[in-house]
């Protein structure tokens, strides 16, 4: 008789098990969406590789011309359009170059032919780059202007949203 009683679940134990189970289920149901919302941006892949049209190839000359274009940017949950700029021209080999105007010294904006006729110039610390965007020795920048990856389709030039380094001069 006493052995039988030991195997039985008391009313108190039954209530404890039931309330713990129901409480755990309700807690999980509340927390799961919050966790999903918090880590969602981490689970989404970066949008990249979206090339953007900037100008027709027959508009490109040997003189750098500044073009502006907009790219989509996702920062966590916030999506926005960001304006980018590039200097587009044919280099001395006749190849297309699309250079970032961001100075490789401390990030100011360079301009073309402001101080010297055939150089990029950064006004912040007198940084200079030659006509192909290579840093000139003796001025603050220690590497060439970065470049955009591009593609040409049906006579139109498309740039990638991001730039990459070209290697030191
Ligand atoms: S930021 Fe361009 S030279 Fe310093």
Image: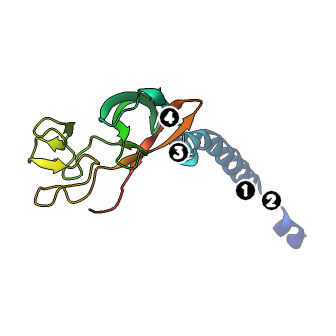
Task: Tell me the crowding category of disc 4: few under 14, some 14 to 19, or many 20 or more residues within 10 angstroms, Cα based.
Answer: many
Q: As displayed, is residue 58 above or below residue 74?
A: above
How far across and down, in percent of the image, does residue 71 sit? Answer: 44, 32
The residue identified by callout 4 is 158
Question: Residue 13's image quarter?
Answer: bottom right
Image quadrant occupied by the C terminus = bottom left
Which circle, 3 or 4, is nearer the viewer?
4
Identify the element where label 3 is drawn. loop
Observer able to see residue 54: no
User: CB under 8 Å between callouts 1 and 2?
Assistant: yes
43 relative position to 66: left or right? right
Observer able to see residue 128: yes
Earlier in the chain: of badge 3 and badge 1, it is: 1
139 relative position to 11: left or right? left
Question: Residue 35's image quarter?
Answer: top right
Residue at image point 25% right, 46% down? 131
Image disc number at residue 9: 2
The residue identified by callout 1 is 13
134 relative position to 19: left or right? left
Earlier in the chain: of badge 2 and badge 4, it is: 2
Identify the element where label 4 is drawn. strand
Q: How far apart are marks 1 and 4 (CA)?
A: 70 Å
Image quadrant occupied by the N terminus = bottom right
């Amino acid at each position: 008789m006493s052995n039988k009683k030991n195997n039985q679940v008391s009313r108190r134990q039954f209530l404890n098990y039931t309330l713990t189970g129901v409480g755990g289920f309700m807690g999980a149901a509340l927390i799961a969406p919050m966790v999903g919302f918090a880590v969602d941006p981490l689970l989404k892949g970066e949008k990249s590789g979206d090339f953007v049209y900037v100008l027709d190839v027959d508009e490109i000359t040997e003189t750098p011309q500044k073009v502006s274009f907009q790219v989509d940017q996702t920062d966590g949950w916030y999506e926005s359009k960001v304006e980018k700029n590039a200097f587009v021209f044919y280099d001395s080999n006749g190849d297309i170059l699309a250079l970032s105007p961001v100075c490789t010294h401390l990030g100011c904006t360079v301009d073309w032919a402001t101080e010297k006729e055939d150089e990029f110039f950064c006004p912040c610390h007198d940084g200079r780059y030659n006509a192909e965007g290579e840093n000139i020795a003796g001025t603050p920048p220690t590497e060439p202007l970065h470049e955009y990856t591009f593609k040409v389709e049906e006579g139109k030039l498309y740039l990638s949203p991001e730039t990459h380094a070209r290697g030191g001069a």
